[in-house]
Amino acid sequence: MVAWLFVQAASILLPTFDAPSWVMKSLVVLLALGFAMAVFISWAFEATPEGLKRTENVPPDVAAKLPTWSPRKFATFIIGVVVIAAGLLAFNLWRNKTETTSRNSASAARTEAAAKSIAVLPFVNMSADKNDEYLSDGVSEELITALSKITGLQVKARTSSFAFKGKNEDIQKIGELLHVNHLLEGSVAKAGNKLRITAQLIEASDGNHEWSDTYDRDMQDIFAVRSEVAQQVATTLKVRLLGEEKKQLDKKPTENLEAYNLYRQGRFYADKLSPGLHRSSR
């Protein structure tokens, strides 16, 4: 019974201290050897006032006077063993429950994080001038950059999203290939100094629209549209924006719109020369 208690205590305490598996194995072997030795000694020897003597060498009258456990002492021992065993069992159940709760919490956190994953597909150029395609690509990249600044939102990199440019792939298939639960797609149409930007957030698993909107703005408001779309995506996906994050979304990369257009055109034609090459957006 004492050996059993040792084994139960070790099975609970050793993992707590990250003890290697050989420690438990060694303890079980030692206890087994000790148990066999104790059985042999108790069968072959008697504990007398003069020390251990072989049973056959102890006279019957001397053996009758040797101390033995009274029923009360034996009952006390049994109760003590039961109390200790119950305590070990209760501790083990509590530890297992705590570990299960921790695993469930971690699993729930991973599931929630996965549910808030998004890819921004290349926006379609709907302008009459096909040379304005640099602008639709720029809007897509600006949204990727903006959404990436939101804590709690997993955003696929430009290289992954732009691999589907010009391809008529099924929404569900794109979601599976990119391992995201949401897709943001849209279009950009430019007429003179006027812009029309449409954006729609789609649930990748079933293709349903969760949100969509159209923005008719002047060209100089292109960064404001980027900020509004990013904030609306965060709201729809129930991602709370921190104060500093909102400031970053509202911050314009430049006040010089002509310089921005030239920069976007340069990036667009550079990508044409080096397809698949991913560059930083700044």
Image: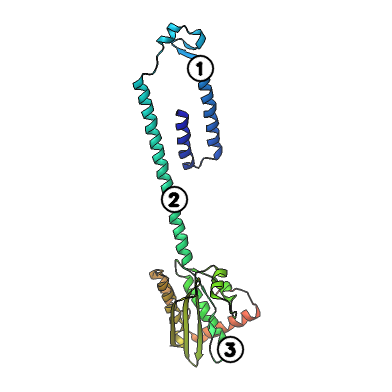
Q: Is residue 112 above or below residue 74?
A: below
Query: What residue lies at 41% left-to-right and 12% top-to-bottom?
Result: 66
Residue 100's disc is: 2
Q: Amino acid at mark 2?
A: Thr
Residue 229 is left or right of residue 274, and the answer is left
Residue 69's disc is: none
Q: Amino acid at mark 1?
A: Trp
**C-alpha distance separating marks 1 and 2:** 46 Å
Residue 10 is left or right of residue 72, and the answer is right
Which of the two discs, 3 and 1, labels the residue nearer the N terminus?
A: 1
Q: Measuring from the top left, give residue 36's x and y in whole percent.
A: 53, 24
Q: Measuring from the top left, give residue 256's x and y in whole percent.
A: 48, 84
* Residue with the mark numbered 1: 43
Q: Amino acid at mark 3?
A: Asn
**C-alpha distance separating marks 3 and 1:** 100 Å
Which of the two discs, 1 and 2, labels the residue nearer the N terminus?
A: 1
Q: Secondary structure at mark 2?
A: helix
In depth, the one of 203 and 195 nearer the eye is 203
* Residue with the mark numbered 3: 131
Q: Secondary structure at mark 1?
A: helix
In depth, the one of 64 and 167 nearer the eye is 64
